[in-house]
Amino acid sequence: MTAHMSMYEFLMREKHDREWEAIVYFDKRMQFGKFVDRIDNLAYYLHKHSVERGDNVAICLPNIPHASIAFYAVNKCGAIGNVIHPMISEYGLLNIIKKTKPKFIFLADIFYEKYKTVLSDIDIKVIVCKLAGFASLIMKAGIFVKGVKEKTPKVPYGPKVISFASTLRRRGEVKICTGGNDIAAYLHSGGTTGEAKTIVLSNYAINAVAINALTTFDTTIDKDVAFMVLPLFHGYGLAINMHAFLSFGCRLVMVPKFTVKGAVRIIKKEKVSIITGVPTMYEKLLKSKEFRRLSCKNFHLLICGGDSLSASLRESFDNHIQSRGSRVKLVEGYGLTEVVAVAAVNTDKNYRTGSVGKPLHGVMIKIVGDDEKELPRGEYGEIRIASQSLMEMYYDDPITTAEAVITDEDGRRWLKTGDCGYMDIDGFVFFKDRIKRLIIIAGVNVFPSEIEDVVSLMPEINMCCAVEGRTKEDKIIIKLFVVLNEGYKYSLTLENKIIQTCKDNLIKFAVPGKVISKPSLPLTQVGKVNYRQVMQMNDEE
């Protein structure tokens, strides 16, 4: 199987049955034939309106069928899918548009009002997608009623504001003029430097990770049903949840917003067998009475990424689903957007507790020290990745690209991840923390993630984040921010228990010098604790 083709061609290569129900959205089923027809119609519309090879089109949509249709249509034209978080700030959207200059932008109707002022002064055409567009009639009515209650404004359609439905009315031939080496996507991320970056990915990179992920899991998914909640602006959501699953015949249940109640209903009704998500999602499911009553016998593949999975959550989740009939367990992966989100993963057949698994098929990982030399197994250093899915570059930033990607004497390109970890004697990778999160006290390396893993095991703790702090005497200490589970109140007794737990399980330098209770902690766009924002929080409870 080759990755040297466009993503559109890769999707079409298997000649799926046109009657196959490829997508489910709010109880409405879309056959693969209809899905492809809509892609082709939209590609024709974009092509007729001067979208050509090398152009880019912004796709600022939640997980709705329009997003997948738009991405593949853009790809068929030879253009680039500029995938943007649908709830980005007006300022953030304006910056991306000014930087990348897309010809069109796809927006959800519920967000049009938020961005219309920003977009009105820019020479760009807006294609508005109705959230209820592909839902069943009953669900459409519910979405409409909710929209009325929330006073969703009407969209003023005209020459610059076009309805998605109107772009599908005519079909014509569009010659596929792109290949594996051409650029397929722009994804926007914090980058290995922590600064906002636009990551440039080729068709080959995304196709390769789709092939390599399924090869690593050593399984077929053509009879599976996937709960798709990870968004397309996330590399895993784009490359695996959408592209790999659809291309290999797995039905997608697309979910624009995660709720426990909605997830349980879908898992039960659709007999979901594959779930990919972040730790906070699995934590919410585990706490749900409805989920705890649910049969888990259909589960085939359960993957967690986006943030470190605590030992307590992994153990609790596995114990529960296995008590409800599951023959699999929750597996953790590791990756960055620069390598299309996944580089290592545990599998049921190749699993080691505490690790993020072995390198994916087609991926090489090594650990290097400060002198740039590869370290022996078991020693901590920076994680470096060489992968078929490695990005081409950071958009319009050759200096940072050169700093992040180095080429060895054999011509192999390696990503400097900025992550600290080690590899054991059997090749399992253990991620510890971002190097920039590393806290050095009295010359000793302290990993915040180790503190968080220990404290998160306590029944009182919902989530926590350890950051560097300073005393009045400018002495470095660990500040630990905690959010309590329902039914618990913060007290001096609980604070002492937290500190004693750390003393019992960690080196003395990792014991918090200050514990601060908060009602919540800031999260990133993919639901993990945003430690950079936590560092700016005050110490008041």
Image: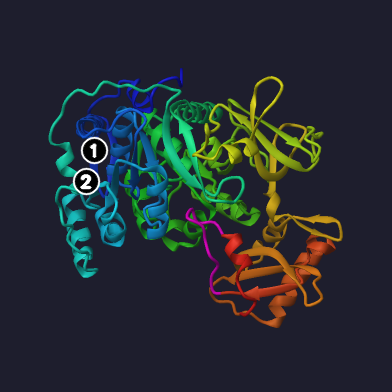
Dividing the picture into quadrants, the one containing residue 182 is top left
**Whole-percent x, y for residue 413 in the image:** 63, 28
**348 left or right of 504?**
left
- Indicate whether residue 525 is drawn in magenta: yes
| Furthest residue in direction right, as rendered | 442
**3D distance between C-alphas at marks 1 and 2:** 8 Å
**Secondary element at tag 1:** strand
Residue that appears at 60% across and 71% down: 537
**Whole-percent x, y for residue 494 in the image:** 69, 77
- Relative to 354, is 76 above or below? above
| Magenta stretch bounds | 519-529
- Relative to 77, is 445 above or below? below
Q: Main secondary structure of the magenta part?
A: loop
What is the crowding at mark 1: few (fewer than 14 residues within 10 Å), some, or many (at least 20)? many
**Whole-percent x, y for residue 152 in the image:** 22, 64
Residue 469, numbered label = none
**442 left or right of 178?**
right
**Whole-percent x, y for residue 127 in the image:** 23, 46
What is the crowding at mark 2: few (fewer than 14 residues within 10 Å), some, or many (at least 20)? many
| Furthest residue in direction top, as rendered | 1
**Secondary element at tag 2:** loop
Residue identifier under label 1? 30
**343 left or right of 369?**
left
Q: Which of the colour schemes (rainbow, by chain, secondary structure, one colour) is used? A: rainbow
The amino acid type, in three-letter code, at marker 2 is Phe
Residue that appears at 75% across and 68% down: 512
Dot in front, 1 or 2 = 2
Residue identifier under label 2? 134
The mark nearer the N terminus, 1 or 2, is: 1
